[in-house]
Amino acid sequence: MASRLMHETADAIEDVRKTLRTCLSDPEFMIRRIEIGIASDAEISEAGAVLRQDQQWTRGRAVLIDSGLYGPSLDPDEFATIAPLDRDASSEISVVAFEALSR
């Protein structure tokens, strides 16, 4: 599911990049964009570069998830029910939290 979400996000970013490319190459849209004073060519190019990096990162993360190189381990303890603690056990909470984080 995570992989599919990352692929869909990368596809959505690609669609935005295509729209920005159209903004830079369509003469009629360029004239309208200049008349109303929205983003300059440089700003659109910069946004495209940032989106390209985001798209590559997202697609790369999806590939890592697909190959099993990235993601949580399927440890059944991750989904275990946690027993409520006594209010007097507040000093033990930090020890338990530290142990969980140091695994």
Image (tube, helix red, strand yellow):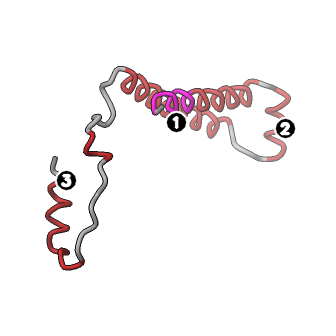
Amino acid under disc 3: Ala
Using the image as rendered, state which of residue 100 and residue 77 is in the foreground.
Answer: 77
Residue 21, horizontal then vertical, whole percent: 68, 26
Cα distance between the residues tagged 2 and 3? 57 Å
Identify the residue at horizontal 35%, vertical 20% (top origin). Answer: 67
Identify the residue at horizontal 46%, vertical 28% (top origin). Answer: 3
Residue located beneath label 3 in the image: 100
Q: Which mark is residue 24?
A: none
Quadrant for residue 48, please give it.
top right
Residue located beneath label 2 in the image: 32
Residue 15, horizontal then vertical, whole percent: 65, 28
Disc 1: CA contacts within 10 A as few (<14), some (14-19) or many (>=20):
few
- Mark 2, secondary structure of its residue: helix
Magenta stretch in the rendered image = 2-10
Amino acid under disc 2: Arg
Using the image as rendered, state which of residue 26 and residue 59 is in the foreground.
Answer: 59
Residue located beneath label 1 in the image: 50
